[in-house]
Image (cartoon, rainbow, N blue to C red):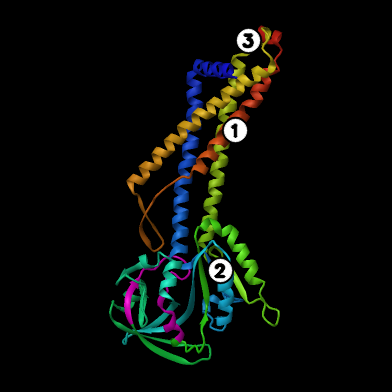
Amino acid sequence: MGNIIKIALRNLRRYQRRTLLTATLITLGVSAVLLFLAISGSFKAMMVGQITDSMLGHLQIHGKGYLASIDTLPLNRTLRENQMAQVEKALGKYPAVAAYSPRIKLGAMFSNFTETTNIRLNGVDPQREVRTVPQLLDRVVQGPKDELLRRGEILVPELLARGMGVAVGETIVLVATNKDGSVNGQSFVVRGIIEGVTGPGGRDGYIHLEDASALLRMEKPEISEIAVRLHDPAQLAATFPAVKKQLESIRNPSGKPLFEVHSWQDLTPFAHIANMIDLMTLFIKIMLVVIVLVSIMNVMVMAVYERIHEIGTLAAIGTGPGKILALFLAEGFLLGLLGTLVGIALSLVSIAALNAARISFNFGQQKGLILQPSITLADIVSIGLVVIAIAVLGSLQPASKAARMDPITALRHV
């Protein structure tokens, strides 16, 4: 086998221009695909992180039918104390669950004593909310960041604060109607101004969970949803179906489901963008396969055609068809290996250069996000193996043709 590799290397050096051109095409294809994977993966991870780590969490649990009417923030589809206990017991069985946070979602009238407008609010437990969506504090653009908020304080959405002329430290009034139609008002101090982000709930205000309960005059604990964070987003594929199956199998005395469980993909239209990125990545990989296949087949077909007399001589001196086949396959393998290694090196240098350049971009309401492309070892290995395998596969037909040549006919070829 070592002699075959040596002869294959010699043959590739004999046709340096063709070898260089083919290896360059493979190099450009590999580096372009890896660079695209790094950039698109970075953008996708940042987009998903902005949504899950600052608003939604990875999973959400609601009372049955809540999501269908979420635009009206219904207060008659909340989870009661015993139902919350069932959810907490179920979540405790999954090591992948890092944190979860109960929320009360409500609509209210917001008044600065001169003007009044509508506001959507999340009543949250500050400590549990920050553990569940750790980037929430990063959205506070004005006001202290040592903790999210305290009782009697409110985080006001940036657009609303600007429109109403509200500043940190001022007092405002919230007026809300509970599910029985009773109206209640309560004054709050503006603790901070929170930046809006693109997506559902991205322009909501925040108050303490106990303040929300008091504002709605809830006699017993009730919540609208439970947001769940996983240790690793990659665990979602395994954890979500298990949690969903367990909770949605729980029935009320009438035999109807009590809960509904949704992943972040079910809650935001940006999941479609993530799917489009995955689809584009697939098409780019297919293009790489086509480039390598066409390049290798072209060069190997020409190699066989130009070396018919040489193939006949090899066969005439006793070289078996298997060794001739292996010789041309080795040439294809070496071309694929060379192009892959140089392409990987080029892509890694390009990724490092992009990280050093610290290119910024805007995503929805988020300004100045830094592009941080990265590539995993699994992607590098998988792309490399696919390219080398396709290079060998592309050499198979020309190599097989060479191995089947009749020595006498080949020697007569001019």
**Circle 1 residue:** 390
Magenta stretch in the rendered image: 189-213
Tell me the CA gap for discs 2 and 1: 47 Å
Residue at which label 3 appears: 309
* Residue 296 location (% of width, % of height): 57, 27
> Label 3 vs label 1: CA separation?
28 Å
Q: Position of residue 343 (x, y in %)?
A: 46, 34
Residue at horizontal 48%, vertical 79%?
104
Note whether 12 is above or below 353 in the view shown. Answer: above
Instruction: Write the residue at 47% across / 54% down.
Output: 44
Indicate which disc residue 299 carries.
none
Residue 332 horizontal/vertical position (percent): 57, 25
Q: Can you see residue 80? A: no
Viewport quadrant of the N terminus: top right
In this rendering, the label closer to the viewer, 2 or 1: 2
Of mark 3 and mark 1, the one earlier in the sequence is 3
- Residue nearest the observer in this picture, 248 or 157: 248
Most foreground residue, 401 or 56: 56
Tell me the distance, in whole angstroms, between the alpha carbons under discs 3 and 2: 74 Å
Q: Quadrant of residue 53?
A: bottom left
Of the image marks 2 and 1, the number of the one nearer the N terminus: 2
Q: Are marks 3 and 2 in contact (CB under 8 Å)?
A: no
**Residue holding disc 2:** 92
